[in-house]
Image: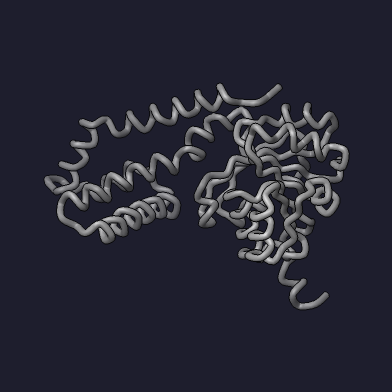
Amino acid sequence: MDEDSRRFEVINAKVGIIGSGKIGEALIKGLISSKKLSRKCLCASDVREERRKYISKKYLIECLHSNLELVDKSEVVILAVKPNDVKKVLHGIREKLTDKHLLISIAAGVTIDFLLKTLGKPIPIVRGMPNLPVLVREGMTVLASQNGTEEHLAMAREIFESVGKVVFMEEKYMDAVTGLSGSGPAYIFMVIEALVEAGVKVGIPRETSTLLAAQTTLGAAKMILETEEHPALLREMVTTPGGVTIDGIIQLEEGKLRTSIINAVVKATERSRELVLND
């Protein structure tokens, strides 16, 4: 085994990604950048010729037009297409899929039961719900499976840890996950946007205000992850008696910030349940 081959031993399988959009490309970039997988063991597909050329040129991997050819070349097949395209794609590849493959679907709202029924045979399946920050390898992905082995689950974990953090949950939680971590970046972007505008309002130049707001949010999140303290305890560390911060918190409470965020997650969860494909 040569030196280059020895560098890539984390994922011992050939991986194919159907769909080279934003999330598909993020996985390609993450797998290559993390050195979890050699380029020669990674391929992708896309219906758009310009997209295939772009992916092939930028990442030096094979990007195919034929999904059947991709399945032939792969042991792990990642379905990174829009939910409405899932049935058509599966109908096109099911003749080539066998129980030797692992199918990973990241199509929002598409259940494992729907995938199995569409395929018409017991293919090992892992369902995933990544979020947008996988684009910068700081994503949060929740994985679920009904029929995957320990080896399959370990493989899926390694793949998605190349673009962020991973947890396993029962599939019944996926709609709630969609409402929280799936939609969550949009809520946080709104909070950051408000902080930026507030900074501008009190006289801080926009570019500096954006940096202050974004880094403050990043640092606060990192403190929660690294200290494992409850967010309320960390908030109290900033909120000294008679200080400045408490006046700001009173305004947020009067504006019902927490209630609004809780309601946003609940409503997004309910909408996810309405859109689910399970039969």
Left or right: 49 with respect to 136?
right
Quadrant of image for the N terminus: bottom right
Taking the spot 72% from the left edge, 27% from the top edge, the residue there is 114
Give the vertical position of 247 relative to 253 (above or below).
below
Please provide percent x and percent y for residue 233. Answer: 32, 44
Q: Looking at the image, which is closer to me, 189 or 127?
A: 189
Q: Position of residue 241 (x, y in %)?
A: 15, 45
133 left or right, relative to 253: right
Question: What residue occupies the far front of the structure in this picture?
Answer: 49
Whether residue 110 is visible here, answered yes or no, is: yes
Q: Against 196, is 59 above or below?
A: below
Residue positioned 65% across, 55% down in the render: 50
Q: Nearer the viewer, residue 225 or 211?
A: 211
Q: Is residue 154 at all visible to an observer of this figure?
A: no
Task: Tell which of 221 and 85 is nearer to you.
Answer: 85
The residue drawn where x is 15% and y is 48% is 244
Residue 267 rendering spot, x and y as whole percentages: 44, 25
> Compared with residue 21, is residue 259 higher up or lower down, i.e. above or below?
above
* Residue drawn at the location 83% of the way across and 33% of the way down: 122
Residue 58 position by quadrant:
bottom right
Report the quarter where the C terminus lies: top right
